[in-house]
Image (spheres, rainbow, N blue to C red):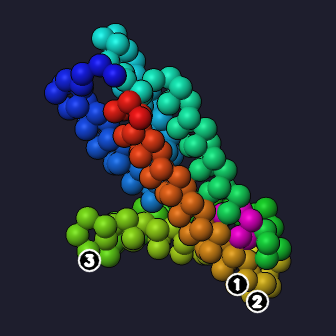
Amino acid sequence: MPEISIGYVFWVIMLLSGSTIAWATNFFSLPGNWFIVGLAALFVVAMDSGNQAAGLNWEAVAIVGLMAAGGEAVEFVAGAAGAAKQGGSRRAVALALLGTFVGSIAGAVMGVPIPLIGPLIGALAGAAAGAFLGAYLGEMWKHGLSEKSFEVGVGAAVGRVLGTMGKLLIGAVMIVVLAVRAFGG
């Protein structure tokens, strides 16, 4: 492996820092893992001109791209399956998705009074609450059955939390893959 320069280490640190920030956007129902893929691709393009990309190359970008797709699949399937498993209508699932986005933003703004991670916890809690409320209202609108609507809402909230946690776990592994590959692993 060629000697690693201080400049290269600096840009790897920037990549990993940016990837960590991108990873955190997953809490807000944003495509944070795809942002990581974009940053990795940008890094490879920038470093490729000097042939400094050690083990972080287009193969690594493809690997994290596949992982990002897997994370999206986990999040979507878990979120939709949570409401659908309880017999939720398409309307309930659609409103759960809308509620997730709105709830995550509201939860982050209100936050939990813990420095740095408080807004992330608030965003996750808000996303779950938004998924619950959206699914509940969607089911009430469609069928008007409050007990079933409550079950569908709980299923959507649990599915959202599990899906987001799965996506976050995959995103964390993506960052580790980038770090290992950046230094020739």
Check if mark 2's residue and mark 1's residue have beta carbons within 8 Å.
yes
Q: Are marks 2 and 3 in contact (CB under 8 Å)?
A: no
x and y percentages locating residue 165 in the rendered image: 53, 64
Secondary structure mostly seen in the magenta stretch: helix
Disc 2 target residue: 147
Q: Is residue 146 above or below residue 180?
A: below
Mark 1 crowdedness (10 Å alpha carbons): few <14, some 14-19, many ≥20: some
Range of residues picked out in magenta: 79-83
Residue 132 in the image, given as x and y percentages of width and height: 61, 75
Q: Quadrant of the N terminus?
A: top left
Residue at far front of view: 1
| Closest to the observer, 25 or 33 | 33
State the separation of the CA atoms marked 2 and 1: 5 Å
- The residue at which mark 1 appears reads as 150
Crowding around mark 2 (Cα neighbors within 10 Å: few <14, some 14 to 19, many 20+) is: few
In what quadrant of the picture does the C terminus appear? top left
In this rendering, the label closer to the viewer, 2 or 3: 3
Report whether 52 appears left or right of 131: left
SS class, disc 2: helix
Q: Are discs 1 and 3 less than 8 Å apart at CB? A: no
- Binning the other alpha carbons within 10 Å of mark 3 as few (below 14), some (14 to 19) or many (20 upward) gives few
Q: Earlier in the sequence, mark 1 or mark 3?
A: 3
- With 32 as the anchor, is 66 left or right in this view? right
Q: Is residue 30 or residue 71 the one in the foreground?
A: 71
* Disc 3 target residue: 113
Amino acid type of the residue tagged 1 in the rendering: Phe
Real-space Cα distance between discs 1 and 3? Answer: 29 Å
Q: Amino acid at mark 2?
A: Glu
Does the segment drawn in magenta span residue 159?
no
